[in-house]
Image (cartoon, rainbow, N blue to C red):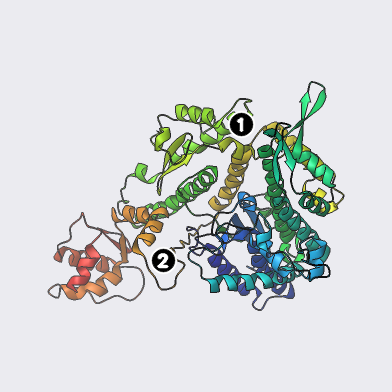
């Protein structure tokens, strides 16, 4: 865990390299192939799931859980990836100084001229017979940015980035080859990516009325972009134009076609681009998991992930690379879900740390450490989100189903249902950081203000039924398969569940993941970045302190300090500090092993002679438990 730029992705890559290398050392040919395949997955997943942000040049814009499955002899047999919460908004909208997903820039920089021509990604020559040149990122709305140079990057850094982009497509292709993805499948993925780029250039505007004023009806301003996108998707330009400019509405037993406004048509265009990319990303991940080199010789899907019965009782090592706690100038549903995930992980962290402290005290026969359990617990915060019927997720899904549900009506119901929860503060409109209703949640890492504007639309994640029907009928088998209807049993289960929305789906995925973590032995790797400038050898105290607080580390230290933070083996303590009381007749220092009764008496005599009473020390069976400051005083005297 850690905030963006702290090194989570790099740490996971190094861990994966080590585990794969350790398994391959002296192993069979299958194990070596698995090792090689795992080394290629990082290249592919980072290309499709990572992007440059103002905080990180290679920021993961999705959550990832990697499961490595072992046999009874600790040999690595298979692996699989589970992903969640891909940042789809980035496909159609990027902030100044940031970039879209790496794969778009790799595609534009790495294609050969003939390949670019097939994807309609070539400049028209300025003069007849002129040289054809591939189009660059600035030629497309989805990859260009008003402020392309982030303040923290120099021209040299941007030139190096462009050089990496040029080589990246070749590296991605080689990685996909090693994972067993056929060349024709790769080309079909490039076609979908190119279609998304062309969709971004589809200009929509309000059609002029006879009197010259703007009307509520949209019209296309760039037929070439529509034609290019439609061709790559196996559709006709007229069909794509039709579903963008009009919509079908059921009126009794009939359907009526009504025109869309320019803003509505723009939302449909962007919705199509986001749906294409998210389905493509899912297909790439599924392709990795199906790769013979990854799923193992027995063909078992190691990631049945994360919890299906196929893995029951099988040894595994899992790595979870998840977003860190977020608090921006304006926080919306995306930040809420990320912080909800971190609340659950913090609850696991608390349970592991504090339960371990309690268990050790009981085992040693000393009074367990006392602390304010309510202050440490975040159960009331989790209840604010997940309680049936009155939690945020339940009320948001309920409001999405109501025909007249709005963000404002949702906010009112949420505030009324949870008015007694001390973790919730409803703010007046002026106190929020943006227009619309706002509320503050007291998270373990601090209070975060959320704006509820857009919650309903984001939770519905609407995708036009007309577009869905059109894509399923595509003449390009790859495109139609991306939008193929789910199996009948899945449709039946979905029908019984009713509307789930983005929050319901994510909560279900998170619950499945948490069950896997709860059934394993969890270890936390806290990634901390030393500064916000992406600079080497620069340490900023406030930046590090904020991350330690957000990671719950300071809270853990506080709780441990309230009890006995230092626990030393009795024989070690006697051997180290016996020189402080030379007047006492102590037994000779014992050898390594369990403390004897003489050792325990000697330890008690030393502590008593140094003036430490019962409130600051506790003598266990094999360890001496020392309150905060005792060890420091002993060291100073020594």
Quarter location, residue 504: top right
In the rendered view, does 452 fall on the left or right side of 192? left
Disc marking residue 633:
none
Disc marking residue 530:
2
Residue most toward the front? 211
Residue 154 visible, this orientation? yes
Please count the marks in the image.
2
Of residue 218 and residue 349, the one placed in the foreground of this image is: 218
Element assignment for label 1:
helix
Residue most toward the bottom? 26
* Percent x, y of residue 284: 72, 58
Element assignment for label 2:
loop
Which corner quadrant holds the C terminus?
A: bottom left
* Percent x, y of residue 506: 60, 44
Q: Which residue is mark 1?
A: 400
Residue at 16%, 63% in the rendered image:
608
């Amino acid at each position: 865990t850690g905030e963006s730029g702290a090194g989570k992705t790099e740490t996971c890559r190094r861990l994966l390299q080590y585990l794969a290398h350790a398994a391959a050392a002296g192993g069979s040919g299958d194990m070596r192939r698995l090792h090689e395949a795992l080394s290629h997955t990082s290249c592919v997943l980072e290309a499709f799931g990572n992007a440059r942000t103002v905080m990180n040049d290679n920021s993961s814009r999705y959550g990832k859980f990697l499961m490595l499955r072992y046999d009874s002899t600790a040999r690595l047999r298979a692996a699989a990836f589970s992903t969640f919460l891909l940042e789809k908004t980035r496909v159609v909208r990027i902030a100044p100084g940031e970039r879209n997903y790496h794969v778009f820039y790799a595609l534009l920089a790495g294609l050969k001229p003939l390949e670019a021509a097939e994807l309609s990604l070539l400049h028209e020559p300025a003069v007849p017979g002129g040289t054809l040149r591939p189009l660059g990122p600035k030629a497309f709305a989805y990859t260009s940015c008003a402020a392309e140079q982030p303040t923290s990057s120099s021209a040299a850094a941007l030139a190096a980035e462009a050089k990496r982009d040029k080589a990246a497509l070749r590296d991605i292709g080689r990685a996909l080859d090693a994972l067993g993805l056929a060349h024709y499948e790769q080309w079909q993925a490039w076609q979908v990516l190119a279609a998304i780029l062309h969709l971004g250039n589809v200009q929509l505007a309000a059609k002029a009325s006879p009197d010259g004023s703007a009307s509520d009806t949209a019209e296309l301003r760039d037929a070439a972009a529509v034609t290019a996108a439609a061709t790559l998707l196996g559709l006709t330009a007229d069909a794509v134009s039709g579903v963008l400019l009009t919509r079908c509405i059921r009126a009794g037993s009939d359907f009526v076609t009504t025109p869309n406004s320019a803003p509505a048509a723009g939302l449909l265009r962007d919705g199509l681009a986001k749906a294409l990319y998210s389905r493509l990303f899912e297909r790439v991940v599924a392709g990795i998991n199906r790769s013979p080199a990854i799923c193992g010789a027995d063909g078992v899907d190691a990631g049945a992930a994360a919890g299906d019965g196929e893995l029951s009782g099988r040894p595994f090592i899992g790595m979870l690379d998840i977003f860190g706690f977020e608090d921006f100038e304006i926080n919306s549903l995306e930040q809420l879900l990320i912080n909800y995930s971190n609340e659950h992980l913090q609850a696991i962290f608390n349970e592991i740390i504090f339960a371990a402290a309690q268990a050790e005290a009981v085992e040693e026969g000393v009074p367990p450490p006392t602390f304010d359990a309510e202050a440490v617990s975040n159960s009331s915060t989790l209840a604010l989100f997940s309680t049936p019927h009155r939690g945020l997720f339940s009320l948001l899904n309920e409001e999405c189903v109501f025909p007249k549900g709005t963000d404002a009506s949702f906010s009112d119901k949420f505030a009324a249902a949870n008015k007694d929860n001390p973790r919730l503060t409803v703010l007046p409109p002026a106190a929020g950081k943006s227009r619309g209703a706002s509320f503050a949640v007291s998270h373990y890492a601090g209070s975060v203000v959320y704006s509820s504007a857009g919650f309903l639309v984001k939770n519905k994640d609407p995708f036009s039924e007309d577009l869905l029907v059109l894509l399923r009928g595509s003449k390009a088998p790859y495109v139609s398969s991306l939008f193929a209807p789910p199996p009948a049993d899945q449709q039946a289960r979905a029908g019984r569940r009713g509307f789930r929305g983005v929050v319901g789906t994510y909560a279900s995925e998170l619950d499945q993941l948490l069950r896997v973590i709860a059934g394993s032995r969890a270890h936390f790797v806290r990634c901390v970045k030393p500064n916000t400038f992406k600079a080497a050898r620069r340490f900023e105290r406030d930046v590090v302190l904020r991350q330690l607080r957000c990671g719950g580390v300071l809270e853990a230290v506080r709780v441990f300090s309230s009890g006995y933070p230092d626990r030393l083996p009795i024989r070690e303590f006697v051997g180290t500090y016996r020189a402080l009381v030379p007047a006492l007749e102590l037994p000779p220092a014992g050898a390594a092993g369990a403390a004897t009764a003489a050792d325990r008496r000697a330890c008690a005599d030393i502590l008593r002679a140094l003036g430490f009473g019962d409130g600051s020390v506790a003598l266990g069976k094999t360890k001496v438990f020392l309150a905060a400051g005792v060890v420091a005083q002993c060291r100073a005297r020594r």
